Image: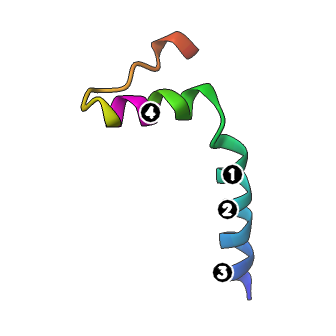
Amino acid sequence: DEIVAWIDHEAEIFMQRVGSPEMMEAVQAFMQKRKPDFSQFN
């Protein structure tokens, strides 16, 4: 099924990004109840 294939593909990409600095900033910002600052990654 094409939808299942896309969901699997999306899950793979998500897992690759989990350890990225951008994701770490997003999680830290969420936990600290602040807006994330992604300017350091530009």
Residue 38 showing in the rendered view: yes
The numbered disc on residue 15 is: 1
**Colour scheme employed for the rendering of this structure:** rainbow
Q: Nearer the viewer, residue 32 or 12?
A: 32
The numbered disc on residue 11 is: 2
Of the residues under marks 4 and 2, which one precedes in the sequence? 2
The residue tagged 4 is: 26
For residue 25: magenta? no
Q: Amino acid at mark 3?
A: Ile
Of the residues under marks 2 and 3, which one precedes in the sequence? 3
Query: Residue 7 lies in what quarter of the image?
Result: bottom right
Image quarter hosting the N terminus: bottom right
Tell me what residue is drawn at x 52 percent, y 10 percent.
Answer: 40
Disc 2 element: helix
Q: Nearer the viewer, residue 26 or 6?
A: 26
> How far apart are labels 1 and 2 at the CA level?
6 Å
The numbered disc on residue 3 is: 3
The numbered disc on residue 37 is: none
Residue placed furthest toward the bottom: 1
> How far apart are labels 2 and 3 at the CA level?
12 Å
Of the residues under marks 3 and 1, which one precedes in the sequence? 3
Image quarter hosting the C terminus: top right
Q: Amino acid at mark 1?
A: Met
Tell me what residue is drawn at x 74 percent, y 58 percent.
Answer: 12
Tell me what residue is drawn at x 66 percent, y 42 percent.
Answer: 17
Q: Amino acid at mark 2?
A: Ala
> How far apart are labels 4 and 1 at the CA level?
15 Å
Dots 1 and 2: beta carbons under 8 Å?
A: yes
In this picture, residue 23 sits left or right of residue 35: right
> How far apart are labels 3 and 1 at the CA level?
18 Å
**Is residue 21 depicted above or below 6 in this figure?**
above
Mark 4 surroundings within 10 Å by alpha-carbon count, few (fewer than 14), some (14 through 19), many (20 or more): some
